[in-house]
């Protein structure tokens, strides 16, 4: 008979399905059209978005599948089984470091962008500190709560972004979309790489799948969730190109926000919606940041199980804050972003490959049990 | 009938712990019933402090003239019943009794269904305080407690706090028996359970936990019972005491248990698989668990056709949005993001604000507090003077403050719209939560504009997802997601489609339609 | 309950921080809203490359019809000279008692003599694009003489001249005007080195301004090369297929007939791929209605109908060819979207020519344009009446 098993920290497939796009939609969505438009011709970037997306979906699937083979086991425990304990500990710590870096990057980026669009004189520390405190508040709550937050915010984000695209229809010039398929191979390759970098945080699956009670179908759900992000990215890219044209998109710092700036709501209640859209994307960025931080905490906690979760949080948050304050100029923030992206993909990719290989080697024994 | 069954249970429970009952600390008397009538009467009087409303009527029985007495408290008893069905029948009875007089009287003379025996003074005095009549017979160590509860009570009226255009007109009253009867009348299911509890160490108030067995999740009942048993308090003036004692988080601004005066609300929630708590002495019953999705629903939603009900619900969501965000948004737009307001509107707002000496945040705070004061004063004022509040509030605060240049007209509009929106939130306790949070948004907007608003919004969401009502996440059915329950959330699907019970309640019997007993 | 303690600590920290104050809060009434910016050359007063910037501030009190501050002017023009617009703006804010805000900037007007210099327009527009506070929808216009003077035009029904001017640019449906030009579009054009047109305004009387025509700016230098007026603009619209709707006058057998064009469009096709002599063909499709006719031909007869259509086609072709001549041969500047067509449909060819399209080698000037018109007269109107009122002139 069904019972009230809400109190525990277990989650369902659906939570993972929602968490993946929540994680993937972050700062990247605001800037990626620029990078992509630099590399590709006219509207061709969508091919790169989809290629990069397919790559991301595949890796998501692979990671989820791997983790799902060890139901209810933490990353540390199954990777210890596969690649021996010390290696597993190092891997876990590296993931934790990635979480910290990602949190710091999102923090730095959000304070930078809010300075562009919302504030002039408010100290940057103030903006990021408030944000960090909210993240800390979220992470110190229950882990299941984080997934519920995803579920609460993701629809809002998808709806408002959809609304933005819908409102932009009036501004679309189809001339901007032509010609098609004129990009050379190099452009596609670079574009694919760039757009793949925007799909951050597949690594969380290594950790979160252990919370899923019945992870049988989780890999499919996770891949499906990632494909939402891919679709959203594609639509946004095409809209940006169609409204601004390739050249302008490549020269606008935050194309998505600029898109919000261009549209006007019919009826004239509000003009200039970029602030509204931006604060709603803050929710998306918040979700990413909170999960990244949570994974960092979770990873460290699995290595040091005796330390209380709250203590880890309060130790890590000053570090995160400090790292986020290091990059001063927008170039440095962009660099940090690239770095975090490469690191994340490198980490996730390598780990996935290594663990899969080891699983193929050792796996029979496991399933024989 | 209802009363009888309740009392039987109460009695049964009481008898179980008669012997070790923690007795009065009065000295000079025992809590045992003696054979001597005079002693017994003295004991009762002494235990209660011989109050003026304690009626002791001595009489003799039959030809032999055995002494007897009936004791009751006037005011909480039905004196007609005592006169006609006890006193009269005893006096008219001239027959001699056989060996066991008390049994004979019980069986043949007293014309009242609810009669119990007791030989413990605590029980007797408790019974008397509950409105029963005690019948003492000289030479007997057993006392008859005759159910004569009655006295003045409010008749069933339409509840003031939750009025509907369409729907049943009855509301709960202070008497728990009546309230239980009202629910019973709605749900004629033998599985409807009323689990008796007693709260108030001194007040000894009755409290029943209602649920429908076979629908409700037993774990929910266990959890609520466990919490009810933990209540340790002398007296509760309203079910609010119970609510505050058993709620999950007392730091939360949100009510985690719903209160209602409407029997139809209770009944429909019981059928959904929730539990209700009815407390003696208050018309407000409690329903648990409560989730954020329920907080904007009214019974009216189900009494109108689905299309209009859905639109009304959307309207209510919109007004909840206004009630929460409007003043905050006003401040954010006026002080931080003037670019978002259309140019023409910007200039006219700027023109009206030209003479206002305060920044928008102070102005909004001023008006919001003024409104809260008006609201509070309006409740305290006698109904006759009540209208003055409208005049004072509308004219003085609105007109005069604007023409004196203290606030801008647009701020008055914002405040008024917020106020009206607040009143369209159906539940008073939810509306209070919104009013409180509104100030949070005002402050956040004053410091960080829209960014502040979204930060506070995220914080509230974090709080909500971590909040639970009776162990059930408060944020359901949004998250954890139960898409089935979305049919009756923001929208209200046609009644014919609402055949499933809310899945977040994890009911034993999910189908609402074939609700067969057993 | 550990959660709640965190909540409290959090609140406490927040409150402590907030004690520091609200940095960015500036109330509406403390802001000076710039509704329009005019840029003039200030060379007679100072060194080369200096501008005179005039900001038009809105005075909200002057806008409200009733009560207190009414009656006064609803705007205030402040001017300063200098080299950088941003810096001049900062100078102006020293004159204003309020924090200047550009978030409601609606119109930028630049004097013609500035734009006639190479590259100046580009430099001037830069600041309006770079600043995040400004919207992409700011409309840009060129003043034939002094830009500042346009801000003194006080129409009877509108209290702020900038608003009047921007509405003037945005609203008229007239085949002799073009769509309002927004800074966002300028950015696209400049980045692609596309030539573009800017509406040109002039002061007509004290109370009204006039939409004179459109100025043609070269894409690579953003230099003004000439102005199209009247029918030349109409011709441009016929070729680009935008804003075609409006009236057109022609003569049928010596009798005046006015057509009202209901809808239309154009298709450009490239006939060959010889970059030194590109052959473009423009097909113009027009649906029209006879709005006014001073003759007595029975238009229900097919013969006459064809005659009318023929006249229209001739007339349109004539107008379009005149425009092509002026734009291609005289200005040698492609504002007729031929380059865009090549980019969209012949991308490889575009790669070859794009760096010498209407500058340098100027392949555009070497190209040939043929024009074909197909006009349909859809609504002949009631012929019993010799004269019928219509929307035309």
Image (spheres, rainbow, N blue to C red):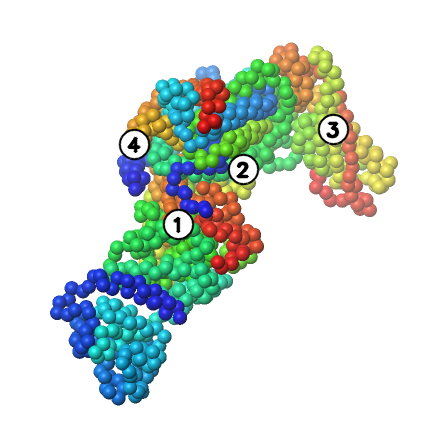
Q: Is residue B229 visible?
A: yes
Frontmost of labels 3 and 1 is 1
Q: SS of the residue at dot 2?
A: helix
Q: Which residue is at a point 57% across and 23% down the rendered structure image?
A: A51
Q: SS of the residue at dot 3?
A: strand
The chain identifier of the residue carrying mark 1 reads: B
Question: x, y percentage for residue C289?
Answer: 75, 39
Q: How many marks?
A: 4
Q: SS of the residue at dot 1?
A: helix
Question: x, y percentage for residue B115?
Answer: 32, 73
Frontmost of labels 1 and 4 is 1
Q: Which residue is at a point 19% across and 76% down the rendered structure image?
A: B35
Give the Cα separation between the discs numbered 3 and 1: 78 Å
Residue behind mark 3: C284
* Of the image marks 4 and 2, the number of the one nearer the N terminus: 2
The chain identifier of the residue carrying mark 3 reads: C
Give the Cα separation between the discs numbered 4 and 2: 43 Å
Q: Which residue is at a point 77% across and 32% down the rendered structure image?
A: C375
Residue behind mark 1: B219
Quick one: label 2, few (<14), some, or many (20+) residues within 10 Å?
few
Residue behind mark 4: A308
Check the picture and name the quadrant holding the N terminus of chain B: bottom left
Q: SS of the residue at dot 4?
A: loop
Q: Which mark is residue C54?
A: none
Q: Are marks 2 and 3 in contact (CB under 8 Å)?
A: no
Please tell me if label 4 and label 3 are on a single chain.
Answer: no
Quick one: label 1, few (<14), some, or many (20+) residues within 10 Å?
some
């Amino acid at each position: 008979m069904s019972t009230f098993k809400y109190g525990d920290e277990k989650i369902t497939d659906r939570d993972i399905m929602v968490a993946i796009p929540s994680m993937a939609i972050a700062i990247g969505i605001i800037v990626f059209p620029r990078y992509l438009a630099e590399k590709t011709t006219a509207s061709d970037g969508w091919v790169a978005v989809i290629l990069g997306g397919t790559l991301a979906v595949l890796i998501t699937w692979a990671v989820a599948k791997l983790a799902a083979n060890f139901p209810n086991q933490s990353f540390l425990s199954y990777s210890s089984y596969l690649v021996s304990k010390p290696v597993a500990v190092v891997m876990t710590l590296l993931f934790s470091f990635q979480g910290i870096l990602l949190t710091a990057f999102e923090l730095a980026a959000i304070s930078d962008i809010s300075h562009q669009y919302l504030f002039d004189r408010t100290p940057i520390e103030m903006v990021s500190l408030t944000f960090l405190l909210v993240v800390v508040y979220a992470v110190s709550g229950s882990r299941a709560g984080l997934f519920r937050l995803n579920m609460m915010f993701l629809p809002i984000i998808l709806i408002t972004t959809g609304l933005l695209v819908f409102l932009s229809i009036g501004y679309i010039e189809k001339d901007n979309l032509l010609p098609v398929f004129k990009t050379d191979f190099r452009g596609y390759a670079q574009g694919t790489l760039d757009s793949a970098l925007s799909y951050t945080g597949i690594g969380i699956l290594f950790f979160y799948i252990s919370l899923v009670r019945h992870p049988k179908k989780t890999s499919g759900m996770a891949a499906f969730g990632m494909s939402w992000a891919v679709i959203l990215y594609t639509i946004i890219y095409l809209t940006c190109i169609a409204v601004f044209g390739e050249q302008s998109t490549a020269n606008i710092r935050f194309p998505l926000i600029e898109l919000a700036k261009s549209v006007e709501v019919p009826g004239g209640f509000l003009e200039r919606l970029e602030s509204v859209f931006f604060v709603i994307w803050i929710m998306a960025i918040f979700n990413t940041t909170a999960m990244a931080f949570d994974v960092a905490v979770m990873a460290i906690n699995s290595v040091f199980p005796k330390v209380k979760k709250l203590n880890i949080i309060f130790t890590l948050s000053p570090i995160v804050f400090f790292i986020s304050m290091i990059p001063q100029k927008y170039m440095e923030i962009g660099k940090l972003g690239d770095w975090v992206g490469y690191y994340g993909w490198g980490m996730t990719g390598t780990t996935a490959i290594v663990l899969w290989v080891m699983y193929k080697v050792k796996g029979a024994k496991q399933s024989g049990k | 009938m209802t009363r009888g069954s309740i009392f039987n249970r109460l009695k049964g429970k009481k008898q179980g712990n008669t012997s070790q009952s923690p007795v009065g600390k009065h000295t000079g008397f025992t809590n045992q019933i003696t054979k001597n009538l005079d002693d017994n009467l003295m004991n009762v009087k002494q235990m209660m402090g011989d109050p003026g409303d304690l009626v002791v009527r001595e009489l003799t029985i039959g030809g032999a003239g055995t002494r007897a007495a009936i004791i009751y408290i006037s005011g909480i008893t039905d004196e007609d019943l005592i006169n006609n069905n006890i006193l009269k029948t005893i006096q008219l009875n001239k027959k001699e009794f056989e060996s066991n007089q008390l049994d004979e009287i019980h069986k043949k003379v007293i014309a009242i269904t609810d009669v119990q025996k007791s030989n413990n003074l605590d029980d007797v005095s408790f019974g008397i305080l509950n409105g029963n009549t005690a019948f003492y017979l000289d030479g007997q160590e057993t006392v008859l407690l005759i159910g004569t509860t009655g006295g003045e009570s409010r008749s069933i009226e339409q509840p003031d706090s939750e009025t509907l255009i369409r729907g049943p007109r009855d509301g709960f009253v202070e008497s728990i028996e009546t309230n239980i009867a009202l629910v019973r009348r709605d749900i004629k299911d033998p599985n409807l359970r009323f689990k008796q509890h007693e709260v108030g160490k001194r007040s000894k108030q009755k409290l029943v936990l209602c649920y429908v067995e076979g629908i409700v999740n037993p774990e929910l009942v266990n959890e609520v019972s466990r919490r009810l048993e933990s209540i340790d308090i002398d007296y509760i003036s309203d079910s609010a005491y119970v609510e505050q004692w058993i709620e999950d988080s007392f730091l939360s601004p949100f009510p985690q248990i719903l209160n209602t005066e409407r029997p139809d609300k209770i009944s429909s929630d019981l059928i959904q698989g929730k539990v209700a708590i009815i407390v003696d002495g208050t018309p407000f019953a409690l329903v648990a668990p409560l989730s954020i999705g329920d907080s904007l629903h009214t019974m009216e939603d189900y009494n109108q056709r689905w299309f209009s009900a859905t639109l009304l619900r959307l309207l209510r969501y919109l007004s909840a949005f206004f009630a929460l965000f409007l003043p905050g948004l006003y401040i954010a737009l006026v002080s931080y993001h003037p670019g978002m307001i259309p140019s023409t509107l910007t200039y006219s707002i700027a023109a009206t604000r030209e003479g206002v000496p305060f920044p928008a945040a102070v102005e909004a705070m001023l008006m919001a507090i003024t409104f809260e004061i008006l609201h509070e004063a309006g409740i305290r004022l006698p109904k006759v003077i009540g209208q003055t509040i409208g005049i004072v509030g509308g004219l003085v605060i609105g007109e005069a403050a604007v023409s004196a240049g203290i606030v801008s007209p647009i701020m008055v509009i914002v405040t008024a719209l917020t106020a009206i929106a607040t009143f369209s939130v159906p539940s008073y306790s939810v509306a209070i939560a919104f009013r409180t949070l509104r100030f949070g948004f005002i402050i956040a907007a004053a410091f960080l504009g829209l960014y502040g608003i979204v930060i506070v919004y995220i914080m509230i969401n974090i709080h909500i997802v971590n909040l639970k009502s009776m162990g059930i996440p408060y944020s359901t059915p949004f998250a954890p997601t139960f898409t089935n329950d979305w049919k009756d959330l923001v929208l209200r699907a046609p009644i014919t489609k609402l055949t499933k019970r809310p899945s977040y309640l994890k009911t034993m019997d999910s189908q609402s339609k074939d609700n067969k007993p057993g | 309950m550990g959660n709640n303690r965190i909540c409290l600590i959090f609140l406490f920290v927040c409150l402590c921080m907030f004690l520091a104050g609200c940095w960015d809060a500036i109330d509406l009434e403390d802001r000076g809203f710039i509704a329009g910016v005019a840029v003039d050359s200030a060379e007679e007063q100072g060194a080369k490359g200096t501008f005179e910037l005039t900001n038009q501030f809105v005075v909200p009190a002057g806008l409200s019809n009733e009560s207190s501050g009414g009656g006064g002017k609803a705007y205030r023009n402040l001017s300063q000279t200098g080299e950088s617009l941003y810096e001049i703006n900062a100078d102006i804010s020293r004159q204003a008692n309020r924090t200047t805000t550009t978030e409601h900037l609606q119109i930028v007007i630049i004097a013609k003599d500035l734009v006639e210099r190479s590259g100046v327009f580009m430099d001037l527009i830069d600041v309006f694009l770079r600043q995040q506070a400004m919207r992409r929808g700011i409309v840009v216009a060129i003043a034939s003489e002094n830009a500042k003077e346009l801000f003194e035009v006080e129409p009877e029904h509108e209290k702020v001249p900038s608003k009047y001017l921007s509405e003037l640019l945005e609203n008229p449906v007239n085949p002799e005007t073009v769509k309002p030009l927004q800074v966002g579009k300028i950015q696209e054009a400049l980045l692609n080195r596309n030539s573009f047109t800017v509406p040109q305004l002039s002061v007509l009387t004290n109370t009204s301004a006039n939409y004179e025509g459109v100025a043609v700016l070269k894409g690579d230098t953003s230099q003004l090369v000439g102005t199209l007026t009247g029918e030349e603009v109409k011709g441009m619209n016929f070729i680009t297929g935008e804003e075609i709707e409006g009236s057109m006058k022609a003569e049928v057998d010596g009798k005046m007939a006015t057509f009202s064009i209901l809808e239309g469009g154009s298709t450009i096709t490239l006939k060959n791929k010889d970059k030194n002599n590109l052959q473009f063909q423009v097909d113009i499709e027009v649906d029209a209605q006879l709005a006014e006719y001073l003759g007595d031909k029975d238009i229900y007869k097919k013969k006459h109908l064809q005659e009318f259509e023929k006249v229209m086609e001739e007339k349109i072709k004539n107008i379009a060819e005149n425009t092509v001549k002026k734009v291609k041969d005289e200005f040698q500047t492609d504002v007729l979207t031929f380059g865009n067509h090549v980019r969209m449909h012949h991308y490889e060819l575009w790669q070859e020519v794009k760096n010498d399209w209407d500058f340098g080698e100027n392949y555009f000037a070497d190209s040939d344009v043929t024009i074909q018109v197909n006009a349909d007269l859809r609504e002949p109107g009631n012929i019993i009446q010799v004269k019928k009122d219509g929307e035309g002139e």
